[in-house]
Image: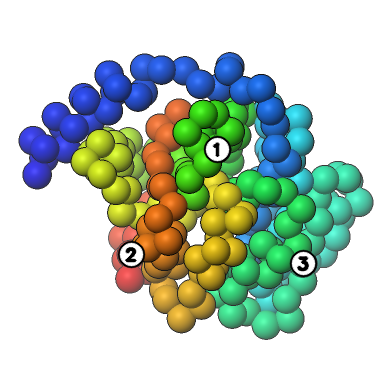
């Protein structure tokens, strides 16, 4: 399988990755960035600040406070007053990421929905790379475009091992699946959806732990195309302790 991934990734590079589409954008649809938030007061402020510097003319940020028990809502109330493009949905009870995203979609004004984890940071040009798949010729059936998560914290050996995992192994698999036919799952930390496609497939299933896999398969059963964009970089934090890694993977 490793040999298959490597050869398919090489094919992907020469057929798709070398071609630049971001500079060819002629239209800029409104994007809604959805951020589910549960007890994230330590990271949500930095995330919102970083999103203000995105190189894209039309986007809004909707944060769904999913019943946080800390002071996340207080921090979000301040951010709403600071930035005109930030809105907050406050859910009284914590019912999971999929449920929070469903509420966010109903409040979204944009025709492109980008879901982002509350501790992640987008590269400044990431939205250009994602949107290009939807608006250029042949993009009418594109339902979702998954981005490329990269590790921010690299101070421990465990974090560096995960850096290799995200940068090479996961990247190779996504490239291979795109060449061989179907991307089997979007990356939950960073993915852009066509809102019409989400509504067509029935949104996320709230009874699944792997909501990213579930929504991918639902889109494909409705014949929407799923794509991978390696140049849409998203910087994430990974656990740096064995206990933290165990908790995340379980």
Please indicate whether residue 11 sits to the left or right of residue 57 in the image: left
Judge the density around disc 2: few (<14), some (14-19), many (≥20) Cα neighbours within 10 Å: few
Q: Where is residue 151, by image quadrant?
A: top left
What residue sits right under mark 2 in the picture? Answer: 249
Q: Nearer the viewer, residue 227 or 59?
A: 227
Q: Which image quarter is the N terminus in?
A: top left
Q: Earlier in the sequence, mark 1 or mark 3?
A: 3
Percent x, y for residue 109?
A: 76, 53
Q: Is residue 169 above or below residue 125?
A: below
Disc 3/disc 2 C-alpha distance (Å): 28 Å
Q: Which mark is residue 134?
A: 1
One can see residue 43 in this view: no
What residue sits right under mark 3 in the picture? Answer: 89
Label 3: which secondary element: strand
Q: Where is residue 135, by image quadrant?
A: top right
* Comparing labels 1 and 3, the label whose residue is closer to the camera: 1
Q: Which mark is residue 48?
A: none
């Amino acid at each position: 399988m490793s040999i298959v991934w490597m050869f398919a990734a090489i094919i992907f590079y020469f057929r798709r990755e070398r071609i630049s589409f971001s500079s060819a954008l002629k239209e800029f649809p409104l994007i809604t960035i959805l951020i589910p938030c549960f007890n994230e007061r330590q990271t949500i402020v930095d995330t919102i600040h970083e999103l203000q510097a995105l190189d894209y003319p039309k986007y809004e940020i909707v944060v769904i406070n999913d019943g946080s028990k800390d002071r996340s809502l207080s921090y979000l109330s301040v951010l709403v007053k600071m930035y005109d493009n930030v809105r907050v949905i406050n859910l009284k009870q914590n019912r999971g990421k999929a449920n929070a995203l469903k509420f966010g979609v109903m409040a979204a004004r944009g025709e492109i929905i980008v879901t982002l984890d509350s501790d992640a940071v987008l590269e400044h040009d990431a939205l250009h790379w994602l949107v290009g798949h939807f608006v250029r010729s042949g993009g009418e059936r594109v339902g979702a475009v998954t981005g490329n998560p990269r590790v921010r914290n690299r101070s421990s050996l465990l974090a560096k091992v995960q850096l290799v995992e995200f940068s090479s192994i996961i990247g190779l698999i996504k490239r291979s699946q795109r060449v061989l036919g179907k991307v089997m799952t979007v990356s939950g930390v960073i993915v852009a959806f066509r809102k019409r496609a989400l509504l067509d497939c029935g949104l996320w299933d709230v009874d699944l732990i792997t909501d990213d896999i579930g929504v991918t398969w639902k889109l494909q059963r409705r014949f929407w195309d799923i794509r991978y964009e390696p140049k849409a970089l998203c910087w994430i934090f990974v656990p740096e302790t064995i206990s933290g890694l165990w908790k995340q993977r379980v």
